[in-house]
Image (cartoon, rainbow, N blue to C red):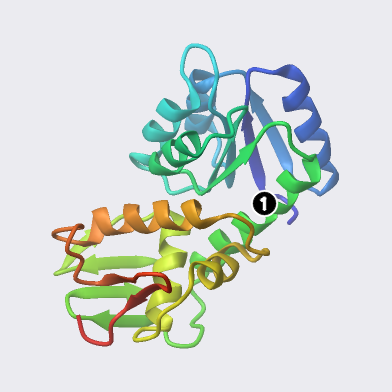
Amino acid sequence: MDNYKILIADDEDEIRDLLAIYLKCEGFEVTTAADGIEALQMLQKIDFDLIILDIMMPRLDGIQTCIKIRKDNGIPIIMLSAKSEDVDKILGLNTGADDYVTKPFNPLEIVARVKSQLRRYTRLNDFTPKLKDEFEIGGLVINTASHQVKVDGKDIKLTPTEFSILEVLARNKGRVLSIESIYESVWNEPFYESENTVAVHIRNIREKIEINPKEPKYIKVVWGVGYKIDNES
């Protein structure tokens, strides 16, 4: 994990300093920002590999910052929030965040999630062929070597986590995958009350690849079981 550059944006000095200490001990290069505006300014100067973004910040909060970043950057984003309600978690994920952690937290949990996101992001951007690297399902084309998705010839922009979920479903096309199996395949950690996390990401994917997300052509739900991509869509 050496040489990865991490940006921490949080208005609380103690949290920035604490996370910086733990991440530096793991060999990461760490830069900090006190709000969203500072974070965006630093992104213009440095090519970061991951951002830890607090939701509640002055001047520009984490939600608006995430939206601005996602306009042209697929970098992994982990959101932090003092709120634990599902609606806040869903809001964070809907803006394009890859993961969400509620305060107070164990710094070692943040380190583990950072490593997990970086492993996924690095794998998605590794152009060495691994297994089958392209799936064509109707008008949907997924290339795991180039990290490209097209629908009817049109390029679709997905976050790293969205791409990983779509890849898992594509590699298992025709099979129904439980929410638990999807979560553990993508996040590489045990499943624990993470139904909303997977459901929100799948809803976001549908919004991007489906003509009518309410009547999906590609990602189908099997009620009480999970999700699948049919062999022929």
| Helix, strand or loop under label 1 | helix
Q: Is residue 101 left or right of residue 25?
A: left
Q: Is residue 18 above or below residue 175?
A: above
Q: Is residue 73 above or below residue 166?
A: above
Q: Quadrant of the N terminus?
A: bottom right
Find residue 195 and report its horizontal and vertical position in percent: 50, 57
- Residue ranking furthest to the front: 224
Give 221 or 26, whichever is nearer the viewer.
Answer: 221
Q: Is residue 222 left or right of residue 123?
A: left
Find residue 218 and report its horizontal and vertical position in percent: 24, 72
Q: Is residue 28 visible?
A: yes
Decide: few, some or many residues near mark 1? Use Cα within 10 Å; few <14, some 14-19, many ≥20. some
Q: Quadrant of residue 35?
A: top right
Q: Is residue 145 visible?
A: no
Which residue bears the numbered disc 1? Answer: 113
Looking at the image, which residue is at 75% across and 47% down? 109
Q: Is residue 174 left or right of residue 54?
A: left
Looking at the image, which residue is at 28% across and 82% down? 230
Find residue 196 and report its horizontal and vertical position in percent: 47, 51
Find residue 169 and report its horizontal and vertical position in percent: 40, 75
Looking at the image, which residue is at 47% across and 31% down? 44
- Residue ranking furthest to the top: 59
Q: Name the residue type under label 1.
A: Arg
Q: Quadrant of the C terminus?
A: bottom left
Q: Is residue 154 left or right of residue 134?
A: left
